[in-house]
Image: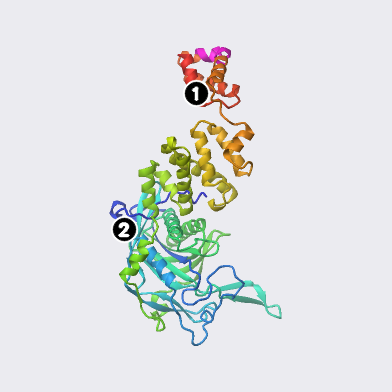
C-alpha cells in the first residue's frame, strides 16, 4: 500500500509548458552530471498473443501455450491482435502523443535459443506511438519527462537454466515458449532524467498509468512490467558520455540500486583513466552490483527490415476517436477534481489517485458517508481520505495486502466515519472499532460499538457531574490554569476522560470545562 500512496502525478490535461523538464534539476554526483533514459516493456492485457490465437495467460506448464507460430513452423503467418493495437492507441492518447496513422512492423534479427524464428517482430522507423510526455513528482515539485516513442512488439521465450539434466546427468537448459509472442508495448523516454530518484518516480508514474488505463496488470514479479535503464555520466556542459544499458529490472528498489551502482562504477572508471565501453549489463540483487553481459548492439546490428508477412498498420481517425470516447478519467485530472470539488489538499488528492482501485474505494466511501449523514457531507471526503492514508494503509502495508481483499468495505468505513461525525463514538473509540472490524469481530460498526461499550457519553447532566467532580478534586490544576498555564486545561480534560472511562464527548467536555472555569 505504501507504493499506492506515493504522491506521484502521472498524467493530466494540464499544459506541459507549465512544468520544467526533469533535466532542469541536475544534481551533480562527484562533479559529474548523470544522464538517464528508460525503456519500459509493458505486457499488454490481451487474452491471446499479438500475432496468433494462442493464450497469453501466465503460469501455465512449460510450452502449454507454444503454438505453431511460436515454434516458427514453416508456413505459419502472423495475424495482428486488434486489442493490442487499441491498448497502444489508449496509451498514446493518455500521454498526449501522436498516434501514427500508418506504422510498420519490422524484423529485428538476432539469435537466441528461445527465439526459434531467429528474429523478433517489432517496430523500428515508424512506431505506432510517437512523442508524448509524462509528469513526475520529486520532492514536492512536478517535472515533465518527454517520451520518444512507444512501439508494439512480441516477447521472446524463456531459457531455464540449472533445472534439467539429460539421461547421463549432464546439465541442460530448458526452453519455455509460453511467453513467445505475448504482446509488448515498449515505451522509450528521452534521456532527460538526472538521478535515480527521478528514474524511479518516472517508472512508478508509468506503472500507475498503464494499470490505470487497464492495458497492463503491472505485475513486476511475473515480468509484466520491467525496465531497462540507459545510464551515462559526463562533466557539466560536456558531450554525452557512453551509455551502458541495465537490462530487465523488475522492481523499483532494484532500479534505484542498479542505477546508483552504475553511476559510481562509471565515475570510478573515468577517474582511473579508463574509457567507458558501450555494453549491456545485468544487475545482481544479491551483490548490489552490475556486470557486463555483452557489448551493446546498435540498430544496424539487428539488420531491421519491414516484415513481408505483415501489411502496414493503418489507424483511421474514427478508430482513434472510438478509443478516446472509452478512455477513463486520467489520474491527474481526477486529482484536480478531488481538490476542487471535495476540498482535499493537493497531497491527499494525489494520494487518492495513485491507482484506480484506491480512487474507486475513496469515491465509494465518500459517497456512502454523504448518504448516511447529509448534514456532514462536507467533511466526508477528508475523513475518507484520512482513513485511507492512515489506518487502512498501515494495515495493508503490515499484512502485504491490497484493497481488493481488505476486510473493511467502503460502506463499512463510511458507517464508521458517520458514527464519529454524529458524536456516537470518539476518534480513539473509532480506532478500536476499526481494529475489531479488520480482525473479523462483529458484523457491523454499530454492533461492535454496543458489544464493546464504546458509545460516547452525550448525556449533558451526567457529564456535568463528572466535570464538577474533576474540578473539585483538582484545585491545583484549576489555579494553574487561571494563572495562565494552558497545559493545565489539557490535564483537566484528561481527568474528565479518565473519570468517564473514555466515554465523554471531548467537545462537550471542553465546552463545559471552559464554562465552569470562566
Q: Extreme right residue here? A: 168
Q: Which residue is nearer to you in this view: 174 or 344?
A: 344
| As drawn, 2 above or below 485 | below
Residue at x 48% of width, y 14% of height: 517
For disc 2, the neighbor class at 10 Å (few under 14, some 14 to 19, many from 20) is few
Q: Name the residue under label 2.
A: 237
Image location (x, y in percent) of residue 188: 39, 65
Percent x, y for residue 54?
53, 75
Residue 31, position in %: x, y?
Answer: 39, 54
Q: Mark 1 points at which residue?
A: 508
In the image, residue 119 lies in the stretch drawn in magenta: no
The reply to whether the magenta stretch includes residue 477 is yes
Q: How far apart are marks 1 and 2 (CA)?
A: 65 Å
| 225 relative to 124 in the view: left or right | right
Q: Is the magenta stretch mostly helix, strand or loop?
A: helix
Asked if residue 74 shows in the view, the reply is yes
Looking at the rendering, the stretch of residues picked out in magenta corresponds to 470-479
Q: Quick one: label 1 or label 2, which is nearer the N terminus? A: 2
Amino acid at each position: 500500500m505504501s507504493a499506492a500512496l506515493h504522491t506521484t502525478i502521472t498524467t493530466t490535461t494540464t499544459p506541459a509548458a507549465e512544468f520544467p523538464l526533469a533535466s532542469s534539476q541536475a544534481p551533480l554526483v562527484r562533479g559529474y552530471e548523470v544522464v538517464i533514459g528508460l525503456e519500459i516493456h509493458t505486457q499488454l492485457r490481451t487474452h491471446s498473443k499479438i500475432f496468433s490465437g494462442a493464450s497469453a495467460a501466465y503460469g501455465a506448464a512449460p510450452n502449454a501455450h507454444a503454438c505453431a507460430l511460436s515454434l516458427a513452423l514453416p508456413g505459419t503467418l502472423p495475424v495482428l491482435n486488434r486489442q493490442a493495437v487499441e491498448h497502444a492507441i489508449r496509451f498514446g492518447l493518455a500521454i498526449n502523443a501522436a498516434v501514427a496513422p500508418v506504422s510498420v512492423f519490422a524484423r529485428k534479427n538476432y539469435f537466441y535459443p528461445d527465439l526459434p524464428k531467429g528474429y523478433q517482430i517489432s517496430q523500428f522507423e515508424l512506431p505506432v506511438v510517437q512523442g508524448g510526455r509524462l509528469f513526475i513528482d520529486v520532492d514536492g515539485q512536478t517535472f515533465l519527462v518527454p517520451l520518444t516513442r512507444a512501439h508494439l512488439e512480441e516477447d521472446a521465450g524463456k531459457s531455464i537454466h540449472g533445472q534439467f539434466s539429460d539421461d547421463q546427468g549432464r546439465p541442460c537448459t530448458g526452453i519455455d515458449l509460453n511467453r513467445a509472442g505475448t504482446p509488448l508495448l515498449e515505451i522509450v523516454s528521452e534521456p532527460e532524467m538526472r538521478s535515480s530518484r527521478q528514474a524511479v518516480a518516472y517508472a512508478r508514474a508509468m506503472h500507475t498509468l498503464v494499470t490505470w488505463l487497464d492495458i497492463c496488470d503491472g505485475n513486476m514479479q511475473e515480468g509484466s512490467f520491467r525496465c531497462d535503464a540507459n545510464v551515462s555520466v559526463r562533466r557539466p556542459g560536456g558531450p554525452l558520455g557512453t551509455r551502458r544499458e541495465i537490462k530487465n529490472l523488475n522492481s523499483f528498489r532494484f532500479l534505484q540500486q542498479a542505477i546508483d551502482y552504475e553511476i559510481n562504477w562509471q565515475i570510478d572508471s573515468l577517474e582511473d583513466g579508463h574509457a567507458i565501453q558501450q555494453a549491456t549489463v545485468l544487475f545482481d540483487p544479491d551483490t548490489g552490483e552490475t556486470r557486463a553481459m555483452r557489448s551493446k548492439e546498435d540498430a544496424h546490428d539487428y539488420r531491421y527490415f519491414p516484415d513481408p508477412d505483415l501489411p502496414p498498420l493503418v489507424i483511421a481517425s474514427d478508430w482513434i476517436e472510438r478509443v478516446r470516447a472509452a478512455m477513463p478519467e486520467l489520474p491527474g485530472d481526477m486529482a484536480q477534481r478531488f481538490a476542487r470539488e471535495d476540498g482535499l489538499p493537493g497531497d491527499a488528492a494525489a494520494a487518492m489517485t495513485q491507482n484506480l482501485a484506491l480512487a474507486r474505494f475513496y469515491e465509494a466511501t465518500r459517497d456512502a458517508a454523504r448518504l448516511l449523514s447529509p448534514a456532514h457531507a462536507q467533511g466526508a471526503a477528508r475523513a475518507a481520505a484520512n482513513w485511507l492514508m492512515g489506518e487502512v494503509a498501515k494495515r495493508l502495508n503490515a499484512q502485504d495486502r491490497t484493497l481488493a481483499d481488505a476486510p473493511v468495505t467502503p460502506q463499512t468505513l463510511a458507517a464508521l466515519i458517520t458514527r464519529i461525525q454524529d458524536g456516537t463514538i470518539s476518534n480513539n473509540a473509532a480506532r478500536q472499532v476499526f481494529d475489531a472490524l479488520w480482525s473479523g469481530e462483529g458484523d457491523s460498526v454499530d454492533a461492535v460499538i454496543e458489544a464493546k461499550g464504546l458509545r460516547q457519553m452525550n448525556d449533558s447532566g451526567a457529564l456535568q457531574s463528572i466535570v464538577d467532580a474533576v474540578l473539585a478534586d483538582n484545585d491545583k490544576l484549576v489555579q494553574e490554569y487561571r494563572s495562565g498555564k494552558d497545559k493545565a486545561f489539557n490535564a483537566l480534560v484528561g481527568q474528565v476522560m479518565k473519570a468517564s472511562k473514555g466515554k465523554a464527548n471531548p467537545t462537550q467536555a471542553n465546552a463545559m470545562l471552559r464554562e465552569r472555569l470562566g
